[in-house]
Image (cartoon, rainbow, N blue to C red):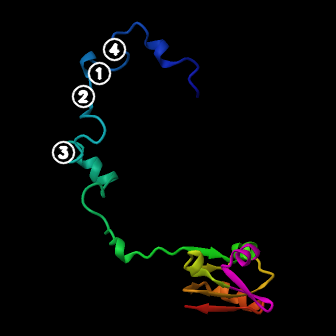
Amino acid sequence: MIRSKRKINKLRGSRSNGGGCTKKRRGAGNKGGRGNAGASKQHWTWTAKFDPDHYGKHGFKRPQKMIKKVNPVNLSYLEEQADNLIESGKASKDGDSIVIDVTELGYDKVLAKGKITKSFIISAPQFSASAIEKIEEMGGEAIEL
């Protein structure tokens, strides 16, 4: 059942407002400290039960020189920008196909997002399997560097 009146209204006029001895309400000493205080001392049973991974090191940190950041580009972007790339000289036309070297644009990998309607000859260090499939489906070529 929902309480119709706030409990504090009932406790008005009482000395300790339902907290027992008034000294118990002073500071955080009565509850053993604030926050995580005493996690390895008086609150150890709580820590062991509810936060067992609180202490110690977990996992490892990979050296930054081992992590290679890949900068990908989608086929849809190349499709949209094809005319601009040809105008700026970063791509060229070879018959019906558009020849693009993705590394000149600052990308490392070609991904297959979007639909393509033109034939592309794209050279890149990496391709996703579906990107190769889409490029070859339109009569283009995917050249891995």
- What residue is drawn where x is 70% and y is 72%? 77
User: Dividing the image into 4 quarters, which one contains the N terminus?
Assistant: top right
Q: Quadrant of residue 65?
A: bottom left
CA distance separating discs 2 and 1: 7 Å
Image side of residue 127 versus residue 135, left or right: left
Quick check: 44 above or below 29? below
Estimate how packed mark 2 is, as few (under 14), some (14 to 19) or many (20 or more) residues with alpha carbons within 10 Å. few
Point out which mark residue 30 bears.
2
Estimate how packed mark 4 is, as few (under 14), some (14 to 19) or many (20 or more) residues with alpha carbons within 10 Å. some
Whether residue 120 is visible to the viewer of this picture, yes or no, is yes
- What amino acid type is highlighted by mark number 3? Lys
Image side of residue 56 versus residue 92, left or right: left
Range of magenta residues: 83-99
The residue that disc 1 covers is 25
Q: Kindly check if marks 1 and 4 are in contact, taking CB atoms under 8 A apart as contact.
A: yes
Q: Report the mark closest to the observer, 2 or 4.
A: 2
- What residue is drawn where x is 57% and y is 76%? 107
